[in-house]
Amino acid sequence: MERTLIIAKPDAVQRGLVGEIIGRLERKGLKLIGMKLAALDKTILRAHYAEHVEKGFYAGLEDFMKSSPVVLMAWEGFECIDSVRTIVGATNPRMAAPGSIRGDLAIGVGRNLIHASDAKESGEREVALFFAEAELFDYDKSEYMHLYEDFERS
Ligand code: DAT
Ligand code: MG
């Protein structure tokens, strides 16, 4: 199964939308395997956003991500990377589809509520960056037989 790192960003915490975000991912049938509140610093943000560090928006992004605690989550599911990106919506909330988290709940690109890993490899890397192995949980989810066919949950 794929793993994705979700960050409920400072705007989600401040606007009281963390529960809404968790609820949408829970209702999809994804399995929550790790969760914690954290204050992110420059070092971890530079590692997480390495591909963006040289870009013009990076300084503002880093300041914003340090402005409040965030909720870090690791979720697991069959091919969940792409389905979570669909639930999250386009980076620019003004272009994000209605029904998506960003499409329904955000408007500014620099205040788009949520981070979600964009590929299987980045999901593995990002979950490992923010979570120690002991903070990740392996457990049976009883509803799996009603969510997946056998080959999808093997
Ligand atoms: P995503 O978060 O959809 O994966 P990304 O990886 O391209 O998007 O960018 C990371 C974050 O950086 C994004 O969620 C918000 C911010 N960002 C991206 N492009 C931006 C821009 N043009 N202006 C301001 N912030 C931007
Ligand atoms: Mg990204």
Image (cartoon, helix red, strand yellow):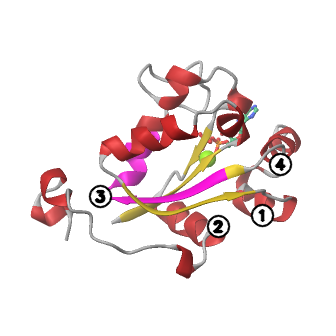
Which comes sooner in the sequence, label 1 or label 2? 1
Picture mark count: 4
Which comes sooner in the sequence, label 3 or label 4? 4
SS of the residue at dot 4? loop
Q: Nearer the viewer, mark 3 or mark 2?
A: 2
Using a 10 Å C-alpha cutoff, classify the residue at mark 1 as few (fewer than 14 neighbours), some (14 to 19) or many (20 or more): few
Q: Which mark is residue 66?
A: 4
Q: Which residue is mark 1?
A: 44
Is 141 left or right of 94, judged from the image as shown?
A: left
Q: Nearer the viewer, residue 108 or 75?
A: 75
Say which quarter of the image contains residue 137: bottom left
Residue drawn at point x = 33 percent, y = 55 percent: 79
| Amino acid type, label 2 | Phe
Which stretch is magenta? 71-85
| Amino acid type, label 3 | Phe
SS of the residue at dot 2? helix
Please state, as top left, top right, bottom left or bottom right, where the N terminus lies in the image.
bottom left
Which comes sooner in the sequence, label 1 or label 4? 1
Q: Which mark is residue 20?
A: none
Residue at mark 3 to residue at mark 4: CA–CA distance: 32 Å
SS of the residue at dot 1? helix
Q: Which residue is mark 3?
A: 78
